[in-house]
Image (cartoon, rainbow, N blue to C red):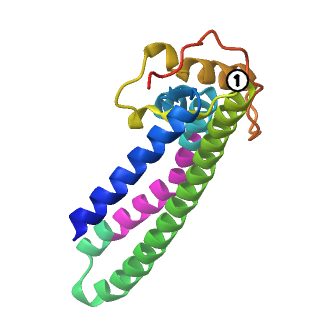
Amino acid sequence: MKKGIKLTLLLGMFMTVTAVSHAKDLKVWYINVLEVFDNYKKTESYDKQLEKMQDDKQKPFKDMADELKKLQDKMEMLKDSEKESVQKQLKEKATVYQKKEKEAFAELKGERDKKMKEIIDDINAAVKKYAKEKNYDFILNETMVVYGDDAANITKTILDTLNGGYTGGSSSSAAPVKSSTATAPVKK
């Protein structure tokens, strides 16, 4: 039953794509989004900002870890009767350490997620603007393309556009799209 439904859906999608492609000459291009993301200057800049933020957040933890180590060392030298109060102190400080470490990690993760979303939004905006200016029907992610003429790969064009418009600030607006030298669409 499931195979029949899948086959029917697949056949329907194929017929729709075939009908649309015969209805007009489609202009289909593709882009390697991961390559654009990795090589976008804003990604590099944000990576450096996040590394600095992580380093700044880890400094107090080193002091807290040293303090915990000292308490552990101190506890080993104490008599059994004195160990209980130091052990309680050690447990409280360890709990505070873990809580603060968890909060710092959550804050860094939130900041990273926010910056990643901003970069993805920039890429999407540049791709949409480029597609509209060139009157393209589709721009696909390269991971979804089984075959595509290299001339239909607009990765470098989009990356150059984004990097050319990036000034080092944290604006989430994409750069204006430059004219491309690429002119060959993906073969149907």
The picture quadrant where one finds residue 74 is bottom left
Q: Is residue 139 visible?
A: no
Looking at the picture, tell me which residue is in the foreground, 122 or 170. Answer: 122
Q: Is residue 150 visible?
A: yes
Q: Is residue 165 above or below residue 184?
A: below
Under mark 1, the amino acid is Lys
- Relative placement, left or right, of 175 versus 120 is right
Looking at the picture, tell me which residue is in the foreground, 30 or 101. Answer: 30
Find disc 1 in the rendering and name its residue: 134
The picture quadrant where one finds residue 69 is bottom left
Looking at the picture, tell me which residue is in the foreground, 46 or 116. Answer: 116
Q: Give the x, y percent position of residue 87.
A: 33, 82
Q: What range is drawn magenta here? A: 52-71
Q: Give the x, y percent position of residue 63.
A: 48, 57
- Relative placement, left or right, of 62 versus 114 is left
Residue found at the far top of this picture: 181
Q: Give the x, y percent position of residue 70.
A: 36, 64
Looking at the picture, tell me which residue is in the foreground, 95 or 132. Answer: 132
The picture quadrant where one finds residue 86 is bottom left
Circle 1: is it few (<14), some (14-19), or many (20+) Cα within 10 Å?
A: few
Q: Is residue 109 magenta?
A: no
Q: Residue at x 49, y 40 (%)?
A: 19
- Relative placement, left or right, of 151 versus 110 is left
Task: Indicate the quadrant containing the N terminus: top left, top right, bottom left or bottom right.
Answer: bottom left
